[in-house]
Amino acid sequence: MTSRQWGDGKRLAVVMSPVMPLWDEGQFFQPLIEPLTRAGYRVIVFDTLSLPGDDTESLEAFSRRWQQELLALGRIDLLAGSALGGAVVQTLLGLPLGASVDKVLLISSPALADGILDGRLGRMADLALLGDVEQALQLLDQWVQPATRIQPTGPIAIDPASAELQARRLHRGFRLLNRLDLRRASEDFAGPLLTVYGEQSQLVRGINVHVNEQARQQRLAIPDGGMRPLLDAPGLVLRTVREHLGIDLEVAA
């Protein structure tokens, strides 16, 4: 498995990455990495798709194999995930690993698919399967933006040396999210859980996220936000993480 680590604090934060054609070395989580390390956390970001597998594997089977890897880490003070990584996190909460987790942060993480989400993820998965990585990535670049302020997507250069790998990762990652329903997996999680999504997201929308309102679970809708709330409203996310998850982050005034 591919991962990168920051800090050497006594608390452990484990982060699962979203679908990416090539892993970004954890940069997607960068707005939270430094605040967490300053708060005494050791942060490990995993490339979720670096766990080998085949295209027929279910999300539950995939998550069970991730459970075997993460159990070796011991107690997890914060388990976080974005998009596919967040779907894996929610699945893990319904498995024995959930008892070893104190707090959960979900970023643009679907718990329930609908026709729009399935259709858009399926379209990108199909394009990747056909080897049209550029078109799949153009759609992804368009759909991660807020619906209210979409910027045109220009040509995307694909390195021929990694084109096959990129197509395989995109197809496998998006297919894992097909017909998703994880609402029961996190229902009984006893610790605080925060799920963050953009009000103007074109992929994971309010209808796709789930919290148990009888538990210590909260949803945070980012006004005018898309699929990247850590870029759209980092201050709001940090303040809510501090308030709801009880993590002593330094937040700018």
Image: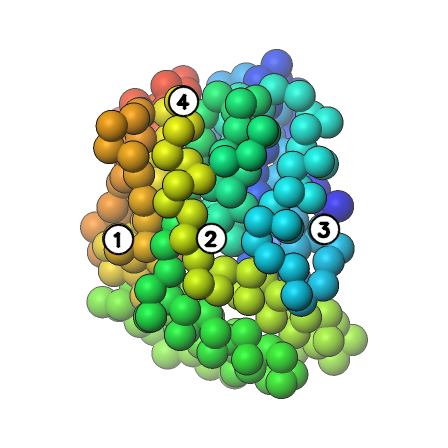
Position in image of residue 240 (x %, y %): 30, 30
> In this rendering, would 210 be left or right of 3?
left
Task: Give residue 16's quadrant in the image.
Answer: top right
Which residue is disc 1 drawn over? 206
12, 114: nearer the viewer: 114
Tell me: residue 156, above or below residue 204: below
Tell me: residue 242, above or below residue 182: above
Which residue is disc 3 drawn over? 51
141, 16: nearer the viewer: 16
> In this rendering, would 44 be left or right of 29?
right
The amino acid type of the residue labelled 2 equals Ala
Position in image of residue 94 (x %, y %): 50, 36
Q: CA distance from mark 4 to mark 3?
A: 27 Å
Secondary element under disc 2, as helix, strand or loop, is loop
Which residue is disc 4 drawn over? 191
Residue 134 in sight here: no
Secondary element under disc 1, as helix, strand or loop, is helix
Which residue is disc 2 drawn over? 83
226, 93: nearer the viewer: 93
Q: Residues within 10 Å of mark 3 (few under 14, many from 20)?
A: some
Task: Give residue 75's quadrant in the image.
Answer: top right
